[in-house]
Amino acid sequence: MRYREFIEHRLAGAISNIESLPSGYHLVGHVALLQIKRELMKYSKEIGEATLQYDNRIRSVAIRTGPTVGVERHPNYMIVAGIQDTIVIHTEGGVKYKLDPLVLTFSGGNIQERIRMASITRPGETVFDMFACVGQFSIPIAMNNARKVYATEINPVAYDFLLENIRLNKVEQKVKPFLGDCKEFQPDENVDRVVMGYLHDTNCFLGYAISALKKSGGIVHMHIAQQEDNKEEIVKHVEDVCSGHDFLPSISITMIKNYAPSVKHYVFDIVLSRKGRV
Ligand SMILES: C[S@@+](CC[C@H](N)C(=O)[O-])C[C@H]1O[C@@H](n2cnc3c(N)ncnc32)[C@H](O)[C@@H]1O
């Protein structure tokens, strides 16, 4: 039985606005993350208890209480049912991620991108993951073809999980972590590929990403949350920054997910080659 049908059935008679119930949840390890409409907040506990009964992998149910905030992207959730311990080991595509989804964001909408990044990295590549968090891109990339991944993370809580995940997935020889601002880090070598997995003013970091690339060029994956009609403005910015570094960009843009009303999460895949060389 589908989740929506299940909770409708469980909660029939107990709550009004049954038609506003959520149609799904995001499962991170044993924690089900739920977003419910404001009018249902007074039934949080009942919805949580019903959700707990739906799937025996769920041991905690958390409801979103506000937007994700700050540079470190702190989510806002409260536990409404189940156990309070929300540190999980979430397994995805053979990668183990230890994290606390009540404290750090782990997006369900980015799963295909995590898989894609691991699969397009070619054997022997060096990669710079500028916004590493708990290793969402660094670890799968390192577990596949990369020779070395440089991973920077500004939030000490995320960084500690990153260190644990490097050990958990046995990629100590491949991932070099750094606690601090990616703008202040220089990889030991110029890299083939840069991943910019951050959605807010990411274009302001593009110059740093380009400086980390090999002199002959490379690839930058720049994620950004934008209104659809602003895309051309970003393309112009990318062209200008690349030109300032003597590179010619070839840009392809893919939508990853809806981010907010009229705002979408895009990834700009930017292949940079030296001007005058084709
Ligand atoms: C939303 S998470 C994204 C994680 C992962 N890259 C992904 O796309 O799924 C963004 C991370 O970037 C980190 N961050 C933000 N500004 C940073 C900076 N200047 N240098 C390094 N890390 C930064 C935040 O602390 C957060 O953990």
Image (cartoon, grey):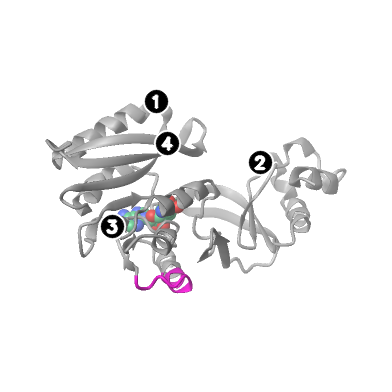
Name the residue at the right extreme: 13
- Secondary element type, mark 3: helix
Q: Which residue is mark 2?
A: 38
Disc 4, disc 3: CB below 8 Å? no
What amino acid is found at the position of numbered circle 4 in the picture?
Thr
Left or right: 151 with respect to 188?
right
The residue carrying pointer 3 sits among few (fewer than 14), some (14 to 19) or many (20 or more) residues within 10 Å by Cα, namely many
Which one is nearer the viewer's eye here, 76 or 161?
161
Where is the C terminus found, in terms of image quarters?
top left
What amino acid is found at the position of numbered circle 3 in the picture?
Cys
Q: Which residue is mark 1?
A: 229
Left or right: 212 with respect to 153?
left
Closer to viewer: mark 3 or mark 2: 3
Q: Which residue is mark 3?
A: 182
What amino acid is found at the position of numbered circle 1 in the picture?
Asp
Magenta-colored span = 163-173
Sequence-wise, which precedes: disc 2 or disc 4? 2
Residue beneath the point at 63% across and 46% down: 35
What amino acid is found at the position of numbered circle 2 in the picture?
Arg
Residue beneath the point at 58% across and 54% down: 77
Residue beneath the point at 60% across and 50% down: 64
Sequence-wise, which precedes: disc 3 or disc 2? 2
Does residue 275 show up magenta in the picture?
Answer: no
Residue 42 spot, x, y in % from top left = 73, 47
- The answer for how far apart the CA atoms under marks 1 and 3 are is 29 Å
Sequence-wise, which precedes: disc 4 or disc 1? 1
